[in-house]
Image: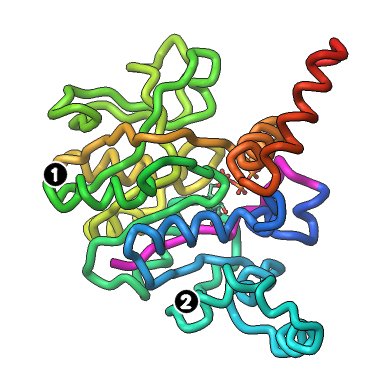
Amino acid sequence: MKTVFPVAGVGTRFLPATKEVPKEILPVLDKPLIQYAVEEAAASGLDDFVFITAPGKEALERYFAPNAELDEFLGRHGKEGLLDGIREFYGKKFTYIRQEQALGFGHAVSLAEAAVGDEAFAISLPDDLILSEQPAMAQMLAVYEKYRSPLIAFMKVPRADIPRYGIAAGPLLEERVFAIEKLVEKPAAADAPSNFAVIGRYIMTPDIFPLLKRGSKGAGSEIQLTDAVVELMKKRRVLGYFFEGRRFDAGTTLGYIETLVHVALRREDTRDFTRRLLRGLAENGTL
Ligand code: UTP
């Protein structure tokens, strides 16, 4: 199965940094967001990656390719190990498709058809960083194997956050899995059918493509995947899955701070320092 990473967005919430640096290259400690997402897919057994990129985001097209000058420099200084995490991706299959205009997330997904063909495919949004025991995408694949229905990742959010998300409701089929009966993009809290929020991991089937191509504009005047999924639901069952793990919204400044702190607390080489830092701040009464 291929994994599609729609990474062509303008990243307005992270301007001015994203004027020149793609949001997905922003580092969480020393690793860009995109690498966390690709590593999660790889750890889930997926090894064929399709990026939907945009003009000006060429750094994303270079990131997983060898850099001969850097390799030579590191070799000369005996520091080859510094690129270990990235080197393992050199031989993997990456396809890059350009979205010339940012017409929306749904439009970006529609462009993947050329690479995906008539097979089911995974979609991963790198600014949803998920820390979990079992990789989130692996959990999704296991559910897809069982039901063979399109599948969307969900988490429950506080009421105040509802207008930022796609929201769905429907009956539970088993622990963590529900059949989506209603799905709305960014509703007002008062109109929302639940507090089940769409998170950026999906497994889609190719019958989504003709529905995306209709190109009707939804929330934010963009072509939204959600609208096409609502159409798909008229034809077949679409499932929601409450993943195990914790998701961080690294695409906003406050979420980014939270992401950095949690990743730093989980990583062995940064844990003690971060704990001391936070404890010191708390004890001085400034936190
Ligand atoms: P977002 O809603 O996060 O948009 O897109 P964005 O442009 O990245 O960020 P903001 O909201 O302006 O700050 C969700 C995902 O869809 C991709 C984005 O790159 C992101 O991964 N996307 C969005 C596209 O690939 N193309 C688009 O036209 C819009």
Mark 1 is surrounded, within 10 Å at the Cα level, by few (under 14), some (14 to 19) or many (20 or more) other residues, namely few
Question: Residue at point 35% right, 17% down?
Answer: 194
Q: Which mark, residue 109?
A: none
Describe residue 236's horizontal placement relative to residue 53 as left or right.
left
Say which amino acid is labelled 2. Phe
Picture quarter with the C terminus? top right
Residue at disc 1, CB closer than 8 Å to ligand 1: no
The answer to whether marks 2 and 1 mark residues whose Cβ atoms lie closer than 8 Å is: no
Q: Tell me: 250 left or right of 108.
A: right
Image height of 266 relative to 24, above or below: above
Residue occupying image coordinates x 48% and y 30%:
165
In the rendered structure, which segment of residues is drawn in magenta? 1-15
Say if disc 2 is inside 8 Å of ligand 1: no
193 lies above or below 205: above
Give the mark nearest the N terminus, 2 or 1. 2
Image quadrant occupied by the N terminus? bottom left
- Residue under label 1, please give it: 236
Residue that appears at 37% across and 41% down? 226
